[in-house]
Amino acid sequence: MAETVPDRPFPVARQARLAVFASGRGSNLASLLGAFPTTGEEPLAAVRLVVSDRQAALALAAAEAAGVPSRHIPFARDRERFEAAADEALREHAIDLVCLAGFMRVLSPAFAERWHGRMLNVHPSLLPAFRGLQATRQALEAGVDESGCTVHFVDAGVDTGRTIVQRRVRIEARDDEPALARRILREEHIAYPEAVRLVLRGEVTP
Ligand code: GAR
């Protein structure tokens, strides 16, 4: 088991090693690969591992195309085994920071504690509003006039950890769920690399 880490694991005095966990399409993975390429030309960090709970995830194909080591680790009803295998992969690749990017599983409080201060998530709402699934639909149903995205530290709750970056999106009267989700996603692609930089420089702590 990995040790619980102190609250201030960053900055590290070398290029940080990132892991990205993704379940599907992987557009946030693509934005992180663009900002922190695995070829290593960004001194702050490089993506060194991709993990997916779904064999068919486009994220795994994107990882292969980018030349990043990747792992398919099944989750289906067995979170403990997923987390043990994930811990092992993260240790094997000497990962400093885990980025959940469209990873649609809830990790255990124990896993969140082991990666305390070293695991981030992106969520398609202005947290604390609209936690959990279908955040964009929740925002439309609530009739609010803006939503957006949040990158936050992961803690033992669901979408409850400290906010690092938020970006706002106005909701137009003609918006349906796909249209709003597309505009929010564009903001996520800016927000996530920005949040990773803030954390790695030690400018935001949990
Ligand atoms: C993103 O909108 C992300 O915020 C959301 O899933 C999408 C993944 O897109 N995540 C959650 O809702 C987590 N609760 P991507 O696979 O193209 O990065």
Image (cartoon, rainbow, N blue to C red):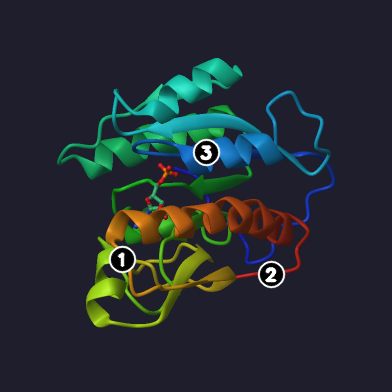
Which of marks 3 and 1 precedes in the sequence? 3
Q: Pointers 3 and 2 in contact (CB under 8 A)?
A: no
The amino acid type found where label 3 is placed reads Leu
Question: Which residue is labeled 3 in the image?
Answer: 29
Out of 85 and 66, give the one closest to the viewer: 66
> Which residue appears at 52% of the width and 64% of the height?
153
**Residue 113, image x and y in percent?**
45, 60
Q: In this view, does 206 lie to the left or right of 102?
A: right
Residue of label 1: 135
Crowd class of label 3 (few under 14; some 14 to 19; many from 20; radius 10 Å): many
Question: Which circle marks residue 62 in the picture?
Answer: none
Distance between the Cα atoms at labels 2 and 1? 25 Å
**Which of the labelled discs sits on residue 204, or is there none?**
2
Does dot 3 land on a helix, a strand or a loop? helix
Please name the residue shown 34% across and 69% down the image: 157
**Cα distance, mark 3 to mark 2?**
22 Å
* Quarter of the N terminus within the rendering: top left
- N-term-proximal mark, 3 vs 2: 3
- Taking the image as drawn, is residue 9 in sight? no
